[in-house]
Amino acid sequence: MNEKDNDKVNRSIEEYADQLISEYEKQVAGDMAGDGHYSVTSGYDVVTNNDKYLSLRINTTVIMASGAESVKIFTINKETGNVVSLKDLMKDRPDYITKISGNIKKQFTIPKDVTGF
């Protein structure tokens, strides 16, 4: 990727990080009178790095009284420098949402013999 595209991708990721920080700061400021304990931890993994795509998975855990985890994927087309979405990757498959949803539902189906019923 050229420097301009690299800067564009870095800005996208930085905007996401700034959003996480802003939400954290609002929570802390809103609880200044209390004894709340807040924590935000975020890191990344390289999911894909081939000739065409670089895909980063940003894992974030937010802990207040309880915890919540979130994942954000940035997939970058190395040829164009653009962050691409699932819709961009599946533009030749208009039924991709139905097929992916079906696969996910199938993975959540528990066979009767496993439950003992």
Image: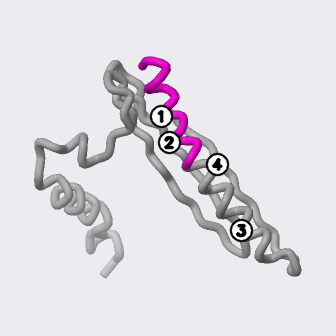
Query: Left of 110 or right of it: where is 35?
Result: right
Separation of residues labelled 2 and 3 (CA atoms):
21 Å
Residue 62 at x, y percent in the picture? 66, 62
Image position of 29 with respect to 59: above or below: below
Separation of residues labelled 3 and 4 (CA atoms):
17 Å
Which mark, by number, is residue 9?
Answer: 1
Residue 16 at x, y percent in the picture? 55, 49
Q: Amino acid at mark 1?
A: Val
Separation of residues labelled 1 and 2 (CA atoms):
5 Å
Nearest the camera: 104 or 47? 47
Residue extent of the magenta highlight = 1-15
Badge 4 or badge 2: first in the primary sequence: 2
Mark 3: few, some, or many residues within 10 Å (few <14, many ≥20)? few
Nearest the camera: 79 or 5? 5
Instruction: Find disc 4 in the rendering and name its residue.
Output: 42
Q: Quadrant of the C terminus?
A: bottom left
Residue 6 at x, y percent in the picture? 48, 26
Helix, strand or loop under label 4: strand
The answer to the question of whether label 3 and label 4 lie on touching residues, with beta carbons closer than 8 A, is: no
The answer to the question of whether label 2 and label 3 lie on touching residues, with beta carbons closer than 8 A, is: no
Coloring basis for residues = one colour
Look at 76% across and 76% down and name the residue there: 30
Instruction: Find disc 3 in the rendering and name its residue.
Output: 26
Instruction: Find disc 2 in the rendering and name its residue.
Output: 12
Q: Quadrant of the N terminus?
A: top left
